[in-house]
Image (spheres, rainbow, N blue to C red):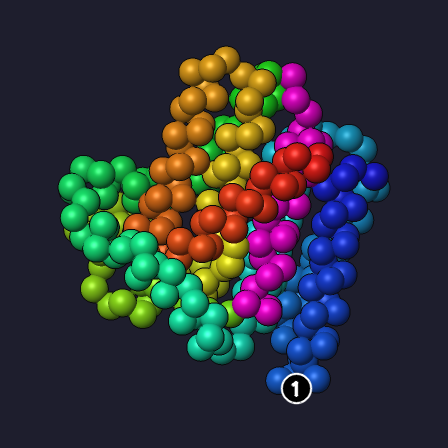
Amino acid sequence: MRAWEAGSTVFFVYLAITALVRGRRRGTPARALTASFVGLLLSAASLRTADSAVLHSWLLPPVLLLTAYWGTGALFDAPMPRIERLLRGCDEALGIRSIALRAPRGVAELLEIAYSGVYVVIPLALWIALAAGDTAVHFWTVVLYTDYICFGCLPWIQSRPPRALEGEPPWQSRWRTLNLQILESASVGVNTFPSGHAAEGLACALLVTGSPWPVVIAMSVNAAAIAAGAVFGRYHYALDAIFGWIVAVIVWLAT
């Protein structure tokens, strides 16, 4: 059994138990249970399928990642006022929105591109890591474990993203329109604490540290840009990104 298969099995069992426990009060969230069933089925199928670079390196892990994301999103019930006050209070203390309002148009565009660029960065980082001698098993163990921790907190730490509370966008950006369209059609529509975006960006940078230094620097700068785009673009709070980075570092060190 690959480590990410074992971790996926544990996560989707956790998702099913969480859905049933919360369902005692609110009705069983069918979408979460469906996602749990699909995730367990995919994990079992992966275990019983002959090793395939295409299937086990490029297809199944991303599908499991998305299944986990949509499954935990189905367990969102209502914003938690204390949590939202804490997250917003930290951003106000750091002056996040005021900094974003003063950002030059070019910087805003670059950060918006970096935010949605995480969807391209993950397969790119996998290709770089494999070229540097790492294994797909190790790569997906780090990425999936990191995401599972981030997504697994959503049923217990529930808040709305800052963009939903602030109304006016922090800056003018053409790329932002595309990002909002992606979120509208593919996002669960609520805030994830810790931030999966920030965590994935840093995990990818850490996973290519065996590559030539220009690649390492580029991926590190990209990880910072993803986190900055998430926070200053008001897709996430600062604490979301900070704890996302902490999760990524802990998982990377542990593996």
- Residue 21 drawn above or below residue 116: below
- Residue 74 drawn above or below residue 187: below
Task: Specify start and end residues of the magenta stretch as a single range.
Answer: 133-157
Does 135 sit left or right of 217 as displayed? right
- Quarter the C terminus occupies: top right
Q: Is residue 15 visible?
A: yes
| Residue at horizontal 63 percent and vertical 36 percent from the top | 252
* Residue 229 belongs to magenta span: no
| Residue at horizontal 77 percent and vertical 52 percent from the top | 9
Does 142 sit left or right of 91 as displayed? right
Q: Secondary structure at mark 1?
A: helix
- Residue 138 drawn above or below residue 73: above
Does 21 sit left or right of 152 as displayed? right
- Label 1, on which residue? 25
Q: Nearer the viewer, residue 141 or 38?
A: 141
How packed mark 1 is, by other alpha carbons closer than 10 Å (few <14, some 14-19, many 20 or more), is: few
| Residue at horizontal 23 percent and vertical 50 percent from the top | 100
Q: Across the whole image, how many numbered discs are drawn on residues?
A: 1
Q: Main secondary structure of the magenta part?
A: helix
Q: Nearer the viewer, residue 112 or 123?
A: 112
Q: Is residue 57 visible?
A: no
Q: Residue 92: x and y, percent?
A: 30, 61
